[in-house]
Image (cartoon, grey):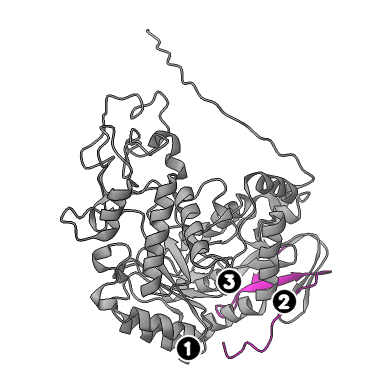
């Protein structure tokens, strides 16, 4: 046999955090990477979106149905279909009424968030000013030959801004300001920012004989490292893309934060980013991407969000009722009940899927979802308090049971129920057809949060608990002060 050895030179810094418990460890970690941003309180309300509103009239009708049926909703979103041929900083003819709808939302005291992708349409005829000005300012990533790297995203051939270059931040800020003059949005949603491309590497391919494109160590990924992203030899102004690929979404979030602060210096920013990295929580919220409308994805959303909270990104959620595929009545009810207790609570689904907003399922289901959302609003001051604590100390908002009860080994693998802070435990039903659910009550006194009935007297106990379709089980921990907001019955 012949053995070949190749050396990989790396510089690694390793930090080990040792604390009195898991929350203390997360506090130390977030102190090092940066504390999470404090979200504006409006972003803690329920939010509604879909890819496939198709026009402003349909978007308005969905909102009016929510208002007429007293469903609490604070924010309405636009996916990429509001743009003219999916080009950033434009509005399509079908959504020509969007500025008026934006004003209508604000008149109702509600907010509006729109999407931006990092990929800029390459218009060689000179008719698309964001691209032309980006060329003039030299903001785009180049290939190994120092020519514009061409990718492909929704509008067609695209160029990718280098957000680690200061001139790019100035260019990005200008065009965000330009869009805001047309459309007075309240927050931005930055998508496709891994960065994703529909080419592998670039339109012209990559120099496959390069050690950078084919490094000695190859992680277990699908296809090549360049699969649906950029060449690793791509040139950013101060770096090879190889060295900063994982920072692309992080750098776009930072640039977007700076742009919004320049636009509204006294306002808190709200940014939702698909791609994150260590420290992204300083500027951005996150959602778990294109989850399937399945019971399996409903259940696995919980550990996903618990992990992100430990990573310093507490403003996080999954698309309620699922994104890919069409949901069904029972799944959407159970997901709406769980989603009412996601830190970031948004119903969102894909193009051509059946409507799944709370009013789409009939009056009985609408009433069930409304009741779940009102539970969130009754706890909104407590939730805001948790975000203040996350911002100041790094404490996770949504916590696994072991974070509050680390000495209880039974809690260590519990990921089908969770805590809001130390005082509220949420125990959803996650199985199709279930009308009971097994709940573990750690060693504390627990009360049903709405009836105030004592359900556990301090012993550690597993109990099969009623879970009728109309409710989600929420418990308060004895000895806690939990502010509740009443008078919200009308939404």
State the mark number for residue 449.
2
Q: Quadrant of residue 228?
A: top left
According to the picture, the residue beneath numbered tag 1 turns out to be: 67
According to the picture, the residue beneath numbered tag 3 turns out to be: 44
Is residue 191 at least partly visible in the picture?
Answer: no
Quadrant showing the N terminus:
top left
Is residue 305 on the magenta stretch?
A: no
In terms of secondary structure, what is the magenta stretch mainly? loop
Towards the viewer: 151 or 424 = 151
Tell me if mark 1 has few (under 14), some (14-19) or many (20+) residues whose alpha carbon lies within 10 angstroms of its own.
some
Estimate the x, y position of residue 413 in percent, counting from the top left: 65, 50
Towards the viewer: 155 or 91 = 91
Does dot 3 land on a helix, a strand or a loop? helix
Which of the marked residues, 1 or 2, is nearer the chain's N terminus?
Answer: 1
Look at the picture and state if 226 lies above or below 340: above
Instruction: State the extent of the magenta-drawn residues as a range.
Output: 462-491
Look at the picture and state if 358 lies above or below 456: below
Tell me if mark 3 has few (under 14), some (14-19) or many (20+) residues whose alpha carbon lies within 10 angstroms of its own.
many
């Amino acid at each position: 046999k012949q053995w070949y050895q190749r050396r990989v030179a790396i510089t690694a810094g390793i930090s080990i955090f040792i604390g009195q418990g898991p929350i203390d460890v997360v506090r130390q970690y977030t102190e090092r990477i940066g504390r999470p941003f404090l979200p504006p309180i409006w972003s803690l309300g329920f939010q509604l979106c879909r890819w496939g509103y198709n026009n402003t009239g349909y978007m308005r009708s969905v909102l009016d149905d929510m208002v007429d049926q007293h469903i609490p909703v604070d924010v309405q979103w636009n996916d990429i279909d509001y743009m003219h041929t999916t080009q950033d900083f434009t509005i399509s003819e079908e959504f020509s009424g969007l500025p008026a709808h934006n004003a209508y939302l604000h008149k109702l005291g509600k907010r509006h968030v729109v999407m931006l992708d990092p990929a800029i349409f390459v218009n060689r005829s000179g008719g698309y000013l964001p691209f032309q000005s980006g060329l003039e300012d030299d903001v785009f990533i180049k290939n190994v030959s120092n020519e514009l790297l061409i990718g492909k995203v929704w509008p067609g051939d695209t160029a990718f801004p280098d957000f680690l270059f200061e001139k790019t931040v100035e260019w990005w800020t200008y065009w965000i300001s330009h869009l805001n003059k047309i459309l007075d949005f309240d927050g931005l949603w930055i998508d496709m920012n891994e960065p994703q491309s529909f080419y592998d590497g670039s339109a012209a391919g990559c120099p496959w004989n390069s050690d950078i494109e084919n490094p000695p160590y190859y992680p277990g990924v699908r296809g090549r490292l360049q699969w649906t992203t950029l060449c690793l030899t791509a040139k950013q102004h101060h770096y090879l893309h190889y060295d900063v690929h994982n920072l692309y979404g992080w750098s776009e979030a930072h640039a977007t934060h700076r742009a919004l602060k320049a636009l509204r210096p006294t306002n808190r920013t709200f940014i939702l980013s698909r791609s994150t990295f260590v420290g992204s929580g300083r500027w951005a919220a996150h959602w778990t991407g294109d989850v399937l409308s399945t019971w399996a994805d409903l259940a696995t959303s919980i550990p996903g969000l618990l992990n992100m909270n430990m990573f310093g990104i507490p403003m996080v959620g999954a698309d309620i009722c699922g994104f890919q595929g069409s949901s069904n009545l029972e799944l959407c009810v159970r997901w709406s009940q769980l989603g009412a207790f996601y830190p970031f609570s948004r119903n969102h689904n894909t193009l051509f899927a059946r409507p799944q907003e709370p009013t789409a399922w009939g009056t009985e289901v609408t009433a069930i979802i409304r009741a779940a959302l009102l539970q969130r609003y009754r706890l909104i001051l407590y939730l805001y308090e948790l975000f203040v604590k996350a911002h100041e100390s790094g404490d996770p908002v949504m916590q696994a049971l072991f974070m509050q009860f680390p000495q209880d080994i039974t809690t260590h693998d519990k990921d089908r129920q969770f805590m809001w802070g130390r005082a509220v435990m949420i125990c959803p039903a996650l199985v199709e057809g279930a009308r009971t659910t097994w709940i573990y009550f750690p060693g504390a006194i627990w009360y049903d949060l709405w009836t105030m009935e004592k359900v556990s007297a301090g012993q550690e106990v597993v109990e099969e608990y009623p879970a009728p379709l109309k409710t989600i089980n929420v418990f308060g921990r004895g000895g806690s002060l939990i502010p509740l907001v009443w008078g919200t019955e009308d939404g």
